[in-house]
Amino acid sequence: MRSLFYYSYRRFSRFTHWYERRFTGIGRLVIAAAVAFGIFGVDTEQTTAYQGFAYLVSLIVLAAAASSMFRGRFGVRRDLPRFATAGEPLEYRLYVRNLSRKAERGLTLFEDFEFSFPSRREFAQAREPGVKRNRVDTALGFYLWMWLLAERRNGAVEPGPMAAVPAGAESAATMRMTARRRGVVRFATVSVARTDPLGLCRAFSRVSAPQSVLVLPRRYRLPPITLPGQRRYQPGGVALAGSAGDSEEFFGLRDYRPGDPLQHVHWKSFARTGRPIVKEFQSEFFERHALALDTAFTGAQAFEEAVSVAASFVYTLETQECLLDMLFVGDGTHVYTAGRGLLRAEHLLEVLAGVRMQQGNALERLETAVLERGGGLASCILVLAGWDDARSRLLASLRRSGLQVLAFALVADDVQIDAARGVRRLRVGSVQQDLLGL
Amino acid sequence: MNTPFGMVGAALLFWGWQSGWLLVAVPLALAVESRVFWRPAHVLDGAGINRFADLSSLALIAVAAWFLVSIEGPRAARTVIGTAQWLPVTLAPLALAQAYLVRTPLDLSVLFVTLRRRPESGLRVDFGFVYVIACVLAAATANVRDEMFYAGAAVFAAWSLWNLRSRRYNRAVPFVMLITASVMGYAGHIGLNQLQRAVTEWVGEWIDRSAQTNPFRAHTDIGSIGKLKQSDRIVLRVRLPEGERTPLLLHRASYNVFSSPSWIARRVEFEALPGEPGSGWAIRESAGAAADARRPSGTEVEVLEYARDGKAILSLPSGTVLLSGLPPAEVRRSRLGSISVETAAGFIRYRAQRGPGTAEQGAPEAADFQVPPREKEAIRAIAARLGLHAIDAAEARRRVERFFRENFSYTTWLEASSPNARTSLAAFLTETHAGHCEYFASATTLLLREAGIAARYATGFSVQEKSLGGDYLVRERHAHAWTRAWIGGAWVDIDTTPPQWFEIESGSSSAWELFGDAWSWLRFAWGRYQTADEDVLPRPLLLGLLAALFAGLAWSIMRRPSRRTAAGIRGPRATAMVRGADSEFYRIEKLLAARGLGRHPSEPVSVWLQRLERVSVAAENDAQGAATRPGELHLSELRAIAKLHYRLRFDPLPMAADRRTELRMRAERWLQAVHTAA
């Protein structure tokens, strides 16, 4: 039964995609009217609706025939930025060069993404997150199918109208793309469409133009957050921190110890005392925070939200004034540090765009990674993609090590967390509200 | 793209002209087209548009309901067509909303409640165009069969498309296309009409051949092996007069030639019977007189059945002289006594009035005496044993009846005929002595023929199962066969099947019968209601109730507060929640915007207030006086309110409750002051 649904939905989706591309809004209205007249005109003796049906069908046939005479040739290129943000519209320019000897007017541009239908297995295993459907909808799986398609397509580009392209010249249209989720959106072809004289049907000239854009995670607005913790000595010193911390400061003089660099010898004191004296500088203290993202296997939506929350911190924290280590467990344990002279927030977002959930002992590895650098950390922001015993243990263990931990857990609406645990509860679906309520 | 001036009005007039409802169409057309003279300042939001759409849907349902209760059958088809004819009226609320209260084209998902929750369909069209389509469709249901409808439809389509055409082409191109389409469409619609006629004729013949009771041929199960199983499905519901004796045989068709295992009706033609619903149809030639002396209606047999395509062979008791209660129909009679009707599809109900005497189907013919050569041997042996050859008809009938009563039993288990007997019927007569009604009827018919009595094989139903409601139920397994013999100058029904057959058949009913019966009861109750001679409730009362219901629902729709999403913001869009979005200051901005003093999107509030001040001073200096006098704006108060608004909006700390109240109070006072001044 499920496979019957699968094949019919696939067919249906293929048809609607074709239908919505091939016919303009007016064209679809004319077809709908023809169907209505056809239904009422089934018995040609009862009503005269069949006459209207005959006329409308003739119109559609003529329009389809007329649109098939489109012979345009085009070249296209895009002015794409490197990044987009999930859920935020992105505008870019699409340049079309008319390669034929005839000027073209009234064109419409469509973007096609690299796309393949989900397999039967994927359809069977897919779960639409965060939506409650009634039994009929669940059994039929149509909404699930539509959701799955949108997820796979990821991006949606509104058709862009283009006024005119003179022969041999180039014109630009502004396109607007919105990506649903983080990851990569791959453009495949550009379809240049022209309508027939009655404006019912479109004909296409397809131009291959593969390109891709990285979609950064969605971000939330964070309330002003004061991070806990204190300044810690950073062995990397200024070279690592730049201005993130105290500047290079003269501290005092002391006797030479083997290994001190010759530049640090204070010659005047050497002359005065007769023994080698060197200058000593203040050690570097500044804030260094860790942002630990829990990538252990959990609900897909909770994980996405967790990535968004992490992205919000990356984007909001002033890494001019401190260092931020972003830790998560992927194939191995990954640590990226943002700060002056190091990576910038955009780089961390780029990394977050590709983070995936991990099976196995991701929590333990994360714990080890955080504890390893625990000595240098002022505090740790821990973003948990769920709440269970393992995560609770992780938090307790981090706290035991003396680390100041600001913990967030993404949970379903009905999950309650004991206030004594010191975890901020963020409900999946109302994260923004909960964040602002902190 | 808006509809051009006059198009919607013209479409309405076209509908009025075609359907004869100009009286309704003219005011509606004027109402819609007056939009060029007057447009209200405010526009509807999404919820408001939905309300108008709901009102239209409600009107549509009300009209359909009205048709369903008020018109004569066939109701289903007429209701659909009638409802379509009133589309211009039912969709008028939306058309008026588009004309007056909405500036942009509507998203067509507004028409369907189920689509509203989904993202927009992306198909935004001025509803005027949809309304024009609805008007033309409604005009089509008037079924005025001259060329004017086609001309009108083509003109409206061309008019709309001309305005929506692609501007990249020379005007001549779409013009030529529209003309070509109208020529093609004209040829096409004539072709469609002719095609349908041809198909109807062909299908009609085909259906005749495969009708459930075939008046030309009856296949029997004589010679079949195994359990004879028939369904429990109820096919007829019958009302018998008080005191009528059951079982009553309802006759459908007779056959005169036996060609094992089938009975065939040779050389029978159907002739049309004159009659009309008022006077009924006379079945027998002498029925004219019988109709005059009509007996009280209590003695009639009333049958209700479902005719899928409107064609049926009627089930009538023996001796029926007059048929009444049918809707307008074509009634035909075959020489062998079958009555066929052709009427609208759906339930049909008819009453059979019986006259004195018995069944009459014309005198016997040569075929009514023939015994097929294959059966002759066995038949002749039995006839000789019973001594049928030299006695009068009444005595022969008695002997045959006794012969079957005393020697035969009923069974639905069919055995293979033994190798001794030449035919299955011979085996039944000489060896098994058991069979079902088809054996008995065939054997009786042939034995009587052997005795020199004209006899025919008759099929139909036996009525004996009484339902709880008092009606008699006739199921598919109550189908029966018997003999009609010409005795004493009339055709007489002779049923030699042992009467136990009915109990034996009933014993085989399935456990699911109860559910089937309940469903069937519902269907037939609906059928009885549809075919009722008079309405259940008096029509004015019904219409009054409908009108009241409609008015009540319409009122509740129009006053319903627009729904808000309970959760507030849904998506994780950072911009979704703005602090201080509930500030009363926005009401002030809105009011001033309505007076043409609105804040530009890029203008900070302080700059805006400075501008207002300048405007006020200028107005004061102007001797003519502007629409807004400076005193009315209470600018200093407004500045104070703005300051509070800023704190609410941008102070990172939440605003103290008393400050918040102060903002609310001062803003309301300001609004009130400005209102009263206006």
Image: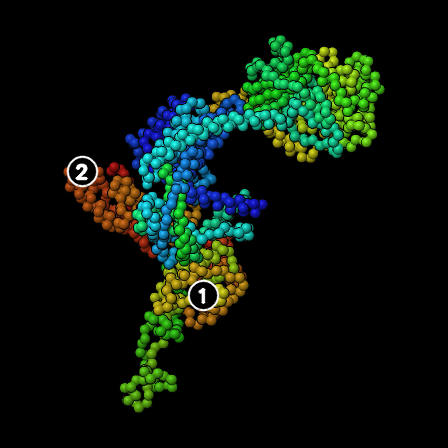
The residue carrying pointer 1 sits among few (fewer than 14), some (14 to 19) or many (20 or more) residues within 10 Å by Cα, namely many
Name the image quarter holding residue B476: top right
Foreground of the two, A401 or A28:
A28
The residue drawn where x is 50% and y is 44% is A12
Residue A171 tag number: none
At label 1, which amino acid type do we have?
Answer: Leu
The residue drawn where x is 77% and y is 15% is B452
| Colour scheme in use | rainbow
The residue carrying pointer 2 sits among few (fewer than 14), some (14 to 19) or many (20 or more) residues within 10 Å by Cα, namely few
Image position of A70 with respect to B346: above or below: below
Image position of A367 with respect to A433: above or below: below
Name the image quarter holding residue A309: bottom left
Residue B625 tag number: 2
The residue drawn where x is 69% and y is 35% is B511
Alpha-carbon distance for marks 1 and 2?
69 Å
The residue drawn where x is 41% and y is 34% is A59
For the residues beneath circles 1 and 2, the answer to whether they share a chain is no
Q: Return the chain for callout 2.
A: B
The residue indicated by pointer 1 is A327
Instruction: Name the quarter where the C terminus of chain A is drawn.
Output: bottom left
Q: Return the chain for callout 1.
A: A
Instruction: Name the quarter where the N terminus of chain A is drawn.
Output: top right
**Percent x, y for residue B190?**
46, 27
**Percent x, y for residue A392?**
51, 62
